[in-house]
Image: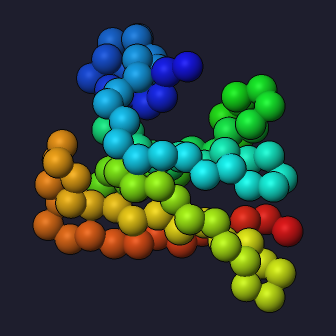
Amino acid sequence: MLLGEYEALTRRGIPITGTENYGGPVVTAGGLLFIAATADAKIRAFDKDNGKVLWEHQLPAEGHATPSVYAVNGKQYLAISVGGSKLKPHPEGAVFVFSLPD
């Protein structure tokens, strides 16, 4: 499976080429696999059984870290640290947190 794409190749009609990956996935008990790790600075959710992309979000910089999944009062959250990658240094790091649908 290829993960990520290079924008210049996608514009030329060559999608999903795969990119260097730094960072790992996390899998929820409900069967969602979350991973960023790519040079295209996107975080994605996959169905762990069939590999289908269920969601993706453009980050301001690469998320070369393994996401964290946690719950507070029964609500599930996904957190990822972005910025400061060795591929494209970003002057500011940040932590993005997303809430999962109920």
The image position of residue 59, as x and y in percent, is: 40, 55
Query: What residue is shown at x 46% (from left), y 69% (from top)?
Result: 96
User: In the rendered image, which quarter contains the C terminus?
Assistant: bottom right
- Residue 72 in sight from this viewpoint: yes
In the rendered image, the quadrant that contains the N terminus is top right
At a point 73% along the width and 77% down the height, the residue shown is 71
The residue at the far bottom in this view is 73
Q: Is residue 81 left or right of residue 50?
A: left
> Image quarter for residue 45?
top right
Q: Residue furthest top?
A: 13
Residue 82 screen position, x and y as percent: 34, 61
Badge count: 0
Seen in the image, is 29 located left or right of residue 93? right
Q: What residue is drawn where x is 35% and y is 51%?
A: 64
The structure's colour scheme is: rainbow
What residue sits 71% from the left and 30% below the top? Answer: 52
Looking at the picture, does residue 1 appear above or below residue 69?
above
State the image coordinates of residue 13 (x, y, percent, origin top left). 41, 11
Residue 38, placed above or below residue 18 = below
Q: Foreground residue, 52 or 30?
A: 30
Q: Percent from the top left, x then y, of residue 78?
A: 60, 66
Q: In this view, does 48 lie above or below 26?
A: above
Can the viewer see residue 60? no
User: Seen in the image, is 54 located left or right of residue 56?
Assistant: right
On the rendered structure, is 65 left or right of 67? left
